[in-house]
Amino acid sequence: MALSAARKTLEFVGEQDEISPLFTASITYYRGSVLVFTSGYAAKPTDVAALPCAGVVTGVYEGGIRDDAYAMGSTALRGRLKRGKVWLPFSGAAQTDVGLPFYLADDGTLTKTAGSKTLGFYALDFKAGFILLDLRACQKI
């Protein structure tokens, strides 16, 4: 299901890294969506090989902007991302998913379908409706 609204609560596990890269301009960013790096910017994932994970959108941007659904203008701004272990929603998550590869879908959600993607994450754990991933551990799969 496409992410079209902010995820109000995310459960992080352990210490998190925070970074503040430039975000691609002219896109709406939802708190809780997962971004990748492309051409030096943090951006929404696309079905392209070898796009490394940037992190999870926190909803905090340069200039004191705080917004759960921020429509970035034509000028790229820096935004805050968290990187580390995080429980991300995945419909139908099961014990059998632990150890399997997951990929970032074009809409900022998770998928088990690689498509053209060559970088992904292995599920560390599951609970009803969620998969635990370490966003610092993006691997060639």
Image (tube, rainbow, N blue to C red):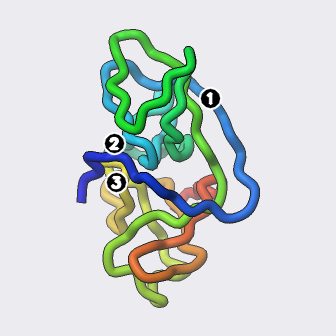
Identify residue type, mark 3.
Ala
Task: Establish if 19 lies above or below 47.
Answer: above
Near-viewer residue (101 or 89): 89
Q: Is residue 40 visible?
A: no
Q: Is residue 52 left or right of residue 90?
A: right
Near-viewer residue (133 or 80): 80
Q: Is residue 137 left or right of residue 58?
A: right
The picture places residue 127, in percent across and down from the top left corner, at 49, 81
Q: Residue furthest right?
A: 15
Q: Secondary structure at mark 2?
A: loop
Callout 3 touching callout 1 (CB < 8 Å): no
Disc nearer the start of the sequence (3/1): 1
Q: Secondary structure at mark 1?
A: loop
Q: CA distance from mark 2 to mark 3?
A: 7 Å
Residue beneath the point at 53% across and 66% down = 87
Mark identifier at residue 46: 2
Q: Is residue 107 visible?
A: yes
Residue beneath the point at 67% across and 65% down = 13
Question: Local crowd at mark 3 within 10 Å, few (<14), some, or many (≥20)?
Answer: many
Q: Which residue is mark 3?
A: 105
Disc nearer the start of the sequence (2/3): 2
Q: Which residue is mark 1?
A: 20
Q: Is residue 34 left or right of residue 115?
A: right
Identify residue type, mark 2.
Thr
Residue beneath the point at 42% across and 86% down = 94
Mark identifier at residue 108: none
Tell which tag, 2 or 1, sits nearer the viewer: 1
The picture places residue 90, in percent across and down from the top left corner, at 37, 70
Tell which tag, 3 or 1, sits nearer the viewer: 1
Identify residue type, mark 1.
Ser
